[in-house]
């Protein structure tokens, strides 16, 4: 079943905004590619994005804002970030920055990292939708995992019934995803080439970019390090019960669980709770975190991928 494709009338944009505020998913045009949008402040909506994309792992998502000033509550922007925002926003540039201490952005949108990617898109429909929704929107490219980038509404509609509405803004102008620059470290690093060129970025920054793909000392793209998302405590998987001193993270109503990812065994709810619960159990009063088995189905694949990394031997 494919999604409902509608023209970008003010009425349809208002309806899309209401749907997003209620936690539903809406595909919308940006100047780069179509995005699959959900409320960036809702772990539930972000988990639904991962379920709709069929990604076997949780890659962190870009959070889109209507106005550049909105990033202040989400991330910590330094002078370099302000310079790039002033020069290239709205536009095809995504900045990875440290999460603000009380950032309202979903931990799942950061895929458990301490950083968050933010971007102000340059498309009248995207901006009208962000304003109508009244909240930042997490939006990966609106294609199923492994499929090509969606540059038309028909591509986005292939995601199917999980998407409540597809706003048809015609073909995308850039047709290539945004450039991703990591400003969370000492040196600015290019994580993904895209709509804004490295030369233009270096001219604005007044310093060279580290190219993550070519430089082994550069920050890695997320997902490359086996124990990248590990909590401080050791993590033990497929546990039937807790050993003395361990916290037990349950699934599907595990008896004796300290916390349960989803008492009803719903993988979307479990994904929504994953990072918040791992953090909540990462306490000195416990010796480790034991995790109940999670079925390798649907979002369970991505949950297990992330848990295996959390449990991998530490370097
Ligand atoms: O043009 C675009 O950027 C489109 C439109 C919809 O805005 N969005 C898009 O999102 O391409 P997605 O999820 O398909 O790609 C996001 C990229 C990934 O390469 C991801 O690894 C990186 O941004 N990323 C997101 N958050 C990150 C973070 N906290 N640290 C490092 N990389 C991050
Ligand atoms: Mg993508």
Image: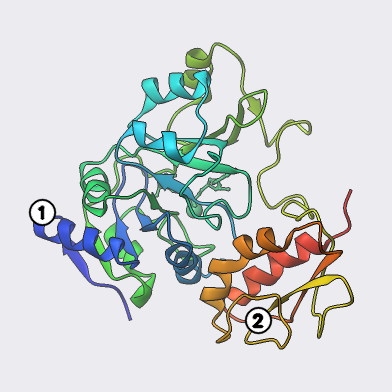
Decide: is 54 above or below 76: below
Q: Residue at x 10, y 59 (%)?
A: 11
216, 103: nearer the viewer: 103
Q: Position of residue 250 (x, y in %)?
A: 69, 79
Q: Total label count?
A: 2
Q: Residue at x 46, y 49 (%)?
A: 104
Marks 2,1: beta carbons within 8 A: no
Numbered mark located on residue 312 in the image = none
213, 58: nearer the viewer: 58
Mark 2 or mark 1: which comes first in sequence? 1
Q: Is residue 305 visible?
A: yes
Indicate the secondary structure of the residue bearing disc 1: helix
Quadrant of residue 85 within the rendered picture: top left
Q: Which residue is mark 1?
A: 10
Q: Which residue is mark 2?
A: 251
Compute the Cα span from label 2 to label 1.
Answer: 43 Å
Q: Position of residue 68 (x, y in %)?
A: 35, 32
């Amino acid at each position: 079943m494919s999604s409902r494709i509608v023209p970008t009338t003010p009425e349809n944009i208002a309806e899309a905004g209401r749907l997003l505020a209620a936690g539903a998913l809406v595909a919308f045009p940006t100047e780069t590619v179509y995005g699959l949008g959900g409320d960036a402040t809702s772990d539930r909506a972000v988990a639904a994005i991962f379920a709709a994309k069929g990604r076997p792992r949780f890659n962190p998502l870009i959070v889109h804002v209507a106005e550049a000033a909105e990033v202040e509550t989400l991330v910590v922007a330094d002078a370099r970030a302000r310079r790039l925002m002033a020069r290239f926003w709205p536009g095809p540039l995504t900045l990875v920055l440290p999460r603000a201490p009380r950032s309202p952005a979903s931990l799942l949108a950061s895929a458990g990292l301490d950083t968050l990617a933010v971007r102000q898109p340059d498309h009248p429909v995207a901006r009208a939708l962000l304003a109508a929704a009244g909240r930042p929107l997490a939006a990966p490219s609106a294609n199923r995992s492994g499929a090509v980038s969606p540059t038309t509404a028909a591509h986005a509609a292939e995601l199917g019934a999980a998407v409540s509405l597809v706003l048809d803004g015609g073909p995308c102008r850039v047709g290539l995803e945004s450039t991703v620059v990591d400003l969370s470290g000492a040196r600015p690093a290019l994580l993904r080439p895209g709509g804004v060129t490295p030369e233009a970025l270096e001219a604005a920054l007044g310093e060279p970019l580290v190219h993550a793909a070519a430089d082994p000392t550069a920050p890695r793209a997320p997902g490359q390090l086996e124990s990248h998302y590990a909590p401080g405590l050791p993590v033990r998987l497929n546990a039937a019960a807790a050993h003395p001193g361990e916290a037990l993270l349950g699934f599907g109503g595990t008896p004796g669980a300290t916390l349960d990812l989803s008492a009803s065994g719903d993988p979307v709810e479990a994904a929504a709770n994953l990072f918040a619960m791992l953090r909540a159990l990462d306490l000195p009063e416990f010796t480790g975190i034991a995790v109940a088995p999670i079925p390798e189905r649907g979002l369970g694949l991505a949950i297990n991928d992330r848990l295996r990394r959390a449990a991998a031997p530490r370097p």
